Image (cartoon, rainbow, N blue to C red):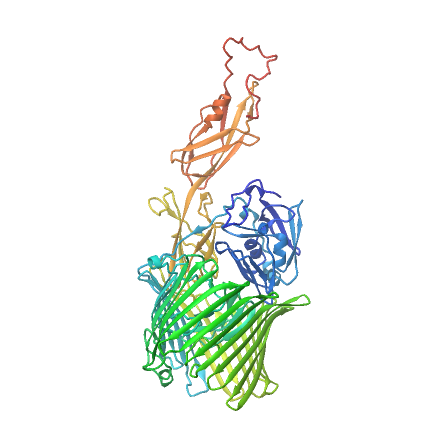
Amino acid sequence: MAAPAAASAQPAGDAPLIDPAALLLFSVQLDDLTLTDGLSAYDTPDDPLLPVGELTRLLEMDVEVLPAERRIIGRVGEARRSLVVDLVSGTAKDGPRNVPIAATDVAVTDTDIYLRASTLQRLLPIKIEVDPEGLAMKLVATELLPVQGRMQRLARRRDASQNIDQKDEVLRVETPYRPFSMPAFDVALGFGVEKSENRLPLRYDIRAGADLLYTGFQGYLGSDERGEPSVARLTFERQSLDGRLLGFLKARTLSVGDVFTPSLTLGPRSLSGRGLAFSTVPLDQTNVFNRIDLRGELPLGYDVELYINDILRSGQNTPAKGRYEFLNVPLSQGINVVRVVTYGPRGERSEDTRIINVGGGLLRRGEATFEFGVVQQEEPLVRLRAIGEDEQAEPGRGKLRAVAAMNYGVTPTLTLSGAAAYLPYGDDDYRTLYTLGARTSLFGFATQLDVAHDSRDASALSLGLAGSLFGVSTVVRHAEFRNGFLDENGIGTDTTREMLRRSELTFDGNVELGRQVVPLSIRGLRNEYADGQVELAASVRGSTTASAFLLSTGVEYQRTTGRGTTTDRLNGYLAGSTFRGYKWQLRSTVDFEILPELRAQTLAITADRDVSDALALRLGLGQALDDASGFNVTAAGILKLKFADLSLSGDYNNADHSWRVGAQLNFGLNYNPILRRYQVTRPGPGSGGSLLFEAFLDRNGNGIFDGDDEPVPNVALEGAEGRIRTGANGKAFVTGLGAGPTSRLLVGLDEVENTSVQTPPTTVQFSPRAGSFTTVRYPMKPTGEVLVNINLRRPDGSLVGLSAASIVLVGDNGYRAAMNTEFDGSASFQNLPIGTYRLELDPDQARRLRMSLLDVPPIVVTGDGGFLADVDAEVRFAPREPAEGASAPAPAASPDAPAQPSAGNVQ
């Protein structure tokens, strides 16, 4: 049924306005299950705007709605294909399939993103049948939905009243950088017994995060297999998405400690070291001719996969200094969906999705970007052991390295760039390098021209074109090198040899095979060296869904000619994954060789399942297909304890009859400001943010806990790993909130004893940061509710309700509330703050209609949650004074005739 009223929904950006009067409450049914009787929708009943966040939560789908970023991301179906809706760029994709969205099909509020039903069913695996007259909605699943796969949760019913008259607002809380905060830690401790020289392996990873000197501090300490510390990282970083760092430079990132230098189109690549780096470049933008480096934390026992536009590009299961690194990752022009999927040893699966807008490098007129980095190359801030022989062999290690780059928009179609670098290439070999470039557009193709020259008289020239050919994103690039110019950015380039030229060609697009849309990526590369050797490389990669499986495949060809030899190699892989029945998480990979001979190489299968909330199982099989006797078996059981995860695992390798039995304990250590001491938590506080929530009855309304204010227990918080409630002191400390740009918690008041309160918005939005905590003060103002009846006395002495009377409650606390009476003369005043109120008539209406109010005793609101007695008030109408010179009015025709306006309505 249609609701009579609703709070206003504020639009975001240029999204269409939502008319509060057009609020509709739909009942939603899936199969024989009623999911809710009150789904808030707007606009026309036959094709309404539906809240994506609320609906996908009802269906228990893995979908995250980010209204502040105007974005929807998630994983759909058992094949876990990607769902991306990015309103900023106008992109909507179900896997590789593009879904057009008209401007009238979307609206954004502070708490949700609304899509029209006809559009939403093209993005989600559901068909939506709308009954506009009965305001009923029937969902038909085209694939198995999570809510169907978890039968034990089908009995849940959503209380429709939660969505009625709820303010469409968000409580935004800042997480300021502090001069100091107590550090938080994530600890991974692995130990066991194995058949090897190191019979009792011991290894640990420790990650720390905190605020220090108004920056975000992140630290890492890792050991070798003997438990001896081997690697350490210390970084102090500060970010500002809107560019408020370093004054007029308007930097967006500033890092000190173990940092990375920026890369250039020609010459230096990004390298680590101890030093300083900053950038003014927006975090979600890059140049189509540039490649990006993706780095992140990779704990013990985890492996990670990289997907670009739903195509599996790479994977890593061995951390480098405690993190994963995907270097020189090429992107296609336009919107790129970059997903880093992490799989844990306890069956965990997490996903970090980035939307990167790749353009031609053009800036607006007068806009400038700047990047700078200076480091002691490949030297950590803290070295725990002496440099090994392999490290000493790396050229330039420990030497000064500095890179600076600037871009400036001259006109809307021309951007100039310039860069300088000071680079070590050996013990005493330093080179100063300068580059100049231009970015423009020629015949609809993004064009980039760069020239470079160094202090050793070496030079380089690069030309790139990028655009769309027959609907396929195409990038062509060619570079010429002279006098031994060293270009570190070439994929597969041997930098120890002099290069003459390099050519690259890439195609990215979709191919329709029947009803399937298959994304394909084709890349070709040619490197020519001064010694006459030529290297050719080509690859084709694609992904698709088949039934409940996500399948990825690819082949890579390499050919080397010159110096009297020719070699050819052609390898491939086939990978599949599924979340079968939303119970079994299955992954498998087959690697094979085609040239120089056709043969299968390896097979790997992993299966994970949560047996219960506290127990998970993992089974793994690795088989060398060219040697049937060489297989590896893994089995593990994972206990998810209240304050830690404990995994017990066993491995056996049939090839050498080696074995290993081990255990791994993962836990967090966080300073609890409520208890004023450290406490053991589940993993997460060292690499993600925490939140201190304080709920209290704010009797004096100043938003601060003081005076006779009282803490409020049993306020529920949802959005972390579980449902957390405030204690008797009204406080709750929530950990493990990640470190994304924004995070949200939902506040539940169902279990609060006194529900007669006025609260801030029930959606809390903040920006978590590793090791930091955000303080959220949640003042709940005690309120009361009173029903006022305005009556008019008839000539016969009876009372009748007076509708459309404008009345006002005026409190001694400065609060005023005005309402019009309903058809029966009643007006329900809700959410009245504590105070004493007097009832008044609207002065304009009272003067116009000659109304007066008989004495009414004061109305006292105590805010104790009790019900106030109804207030009955009587109004009188003064007789109209006759005009000057007019005779007195004739007497009424009968004793029952009214001597005042008609009772029951005020006009």
Image label count: 0
Q: Is residue 496 left or right of residue 592?
A: left
Give how far across and how far down residue 202 sits, in percent: 40, 80
Q: Which of 620 and 104 is in front in this view?
A: 104
Q: Which of 384 and 148 is in front in this view?
A: 384
Query: Quadrant of the image for the N terminus?
Result: top right
Query: Quadrant of the image for the C terminus?
Result: top right
Q: Is 529 drawn above or below residue 855 in the view shown?
A: below
Give how far across and how far down residue 336 sits, in percent: 53, 65
Query: Is residue 358 visible in this depiction of the protein?
Result: no
Give how far across and how far down residue 153 sits, in percent: 58, 59
Q: Is 570 drawn above or below residue 796 in the view shown?
A: below
Residue at the farthest right position:
514
Q: Is residue 326 left or right of residue 229?
A: right
Q: Which of 256 and 785 is in front in this view?
A: 256
Residue at the farthest bottom position:
564
Q: Nearer the viewer, residue 653 or 191?
A: 653
Give how far across and how far down residue 157 sits, in percent: 58, 53
Query: What residue is shown at x 45% (from left), y 42% (from top)?
Result: 865
Q: Is 316 drawn above or below residue 416 in the view shown?
A: below
Query: Is residue 130 visible in this depiction of the protein?
Result: yes
Query: What residue is shown at x 45% (from left), y 78% (from top)?
Result: 481
In the figure, residue 378 lies in which quadrant? bottom left
